[in-house]
Image (cartoon, rainbow, N blue to C red):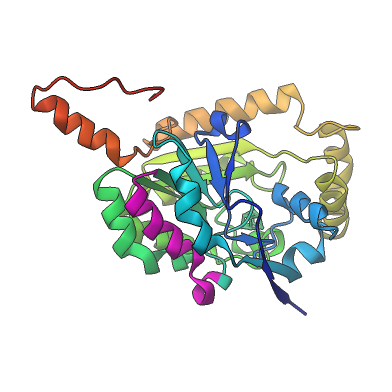
């Protein structure tokens, strides 16, 4: 039985050094836990900090950050404008809770005032509800949407991501968005022996490209020491025959697949992205200041230096 509770967050925007290599400097998650319940989800670990478990609790005990709306504008003022904010790093910001609570929509409204650059990662078609705001943000280059989809195999995804929309719904979401907003196929994580076959990745890249995705973000699967036992338990039930191969790929405390596997996967992903014309360099959203600044430069005026801007 699902339980939804209010949560008072100490801060609603989190600075993140770790995110810099993934193209963001701060993260924002309106909810805790995620009804999509992907078994590979690294964010399951965050429920441990609440004294809850990484299995059922992550999916059934959901928290709504009730103080997000009153705190957000103030916290945004403290984030330098040149920093990119990632919305949805530890939860899906458009999971079904959003239909009622509209916190993600509130974030878009706040960012359209503050001028920050934003990436959004989601599996949900609810993102289309906010096309009005997304189109405005996209017009100034401020937003890029990542649609998370790792395979077109409906049956496999039903097992791996039991609460998430079907692949067809997500492709349709890419199609609806891509007319107005830059859309990235977020093909992460690549799940060894389940979604890493060349033919299935080829079909995925082709379908996402045809739907309008302009770039792809794909990566190997990380299994933290907390999530690994949970994932292996799931595998034991779903595909027990794969367990020995996984134990070899992720031995002991290893969080990533071994070097040989990683190298092969990288080469395959690189070749597929090229073949399907999907950029491997992600489009980076830009703050509104930068556009204003560019216009200023075009007018031939002297301008103050852009500090720390990439
Ligand atoms: S949708 Fe994202 S945050 Fe939600 S369970 Fe799946 S991977 Fe985790």
| Position of residue 301 measured from the top left corner of the image (x, y, whole percent) | 11, 22
In this rendering, the answer to whether 66 lies above or below 38 is below
Q: Main secondary structure of the magenta part?
A: helix
Q: Which of 291 and 261 is in front in this view?
A: 291
Q: Is residue 194 left or right of residue 57?
A: left
| Image: magenta residue range | 98-116
Can residue 136 be seen here?
Answer: yes
The residue depicted at 41 percent of the width and 22 percent of the height is 308
Q: Give the quadrant of the N terminus.
A: bottom right
Locate residue 271, reporting x and y percent.
Answer: 48, 28
Q: Where is residue 17 in the image (x, y as percent from the top left)?
A: 61, 31
Q: Quick check: is 111 in the magenta stretch?
A: yes
Residue 50 percent coordinates (x, y)? 80, 57
Towards the viewer: 99 or 215? 99
Which residue shows up at 22% across the image and 31% down it? 293
Q: In which quarter of the image is the C terminus?
A: top left
Residue 66, quarter of picture:
bottom right
Q: Left of 310 or right of it: where is 90? A: right
Taking the image as drawn, is residue 203 in sight? no
Q: Furthest-bottom residue in view? A: 1
In the image, 191 versus 105, the foreground residue is 105
């Amino acid at each position: 039985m699902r339980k939804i509770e209010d949560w008072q967050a100490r801060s609603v925007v989190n600075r993140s050094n770790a995110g810099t290599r993934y193209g963001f400097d701060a993260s924002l998650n309106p909810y805790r836990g995620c009804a999509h319940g992907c078994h590979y989800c690294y964010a399951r670990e965050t429920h441990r900090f609440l004294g809850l478990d990484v299995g059922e609790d992550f999916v059934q005990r959901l928290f709504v950050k009730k103080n997000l709306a009153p705190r957000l504008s103030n916290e945004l003022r403290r984030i330098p404008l040149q920093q990119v904010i990632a919305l949805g790093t530890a939860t899906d910001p458009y999971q079904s809770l959003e239909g009622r609570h509209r916190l993600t929509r509130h974030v878009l409204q706040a960012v359209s005032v503050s001028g920050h650059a934003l990436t959004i990662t989601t599996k949900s078609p609810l993102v289309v509800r906010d096309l009005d705001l997304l189109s405005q943000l996209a017009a100034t280059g401020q937003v890029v949407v990542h649609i998370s989809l790792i395979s077109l195999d409906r049956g496999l995804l039903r097992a791996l991501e039991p609460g998430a929309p079907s692949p067809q719904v997500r492709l349709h979401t890419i199609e609806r968005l891509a007319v107005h907003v830059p859309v990235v196929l977020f093909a992460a994580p690549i799940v060894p022996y389940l979604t890493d076959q060349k033919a299935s990745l080829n079909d995925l890249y082709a379908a996402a490209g045809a739907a309008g995705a302009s770039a792809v973000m794909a990566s190997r699967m990380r299994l933290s020491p907390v999530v690994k036992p949970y994932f292996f338990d799931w595998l034991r039930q779903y595909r027990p025959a794969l367990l020995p191969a996984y134990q070899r790929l992720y031995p002991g405390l290893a969080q990533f697949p071994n070097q040989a596997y990683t190298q092969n996967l990288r080469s395959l992903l690189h070749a597929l992205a090229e073949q399907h014309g999907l950029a491997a360099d992600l489009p980076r959203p830009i703050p509104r200041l930068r556009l204003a600044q560019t216009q200023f430069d075009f007018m031939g005026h002297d301008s103050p230096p852009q500090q720390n801007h990439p």
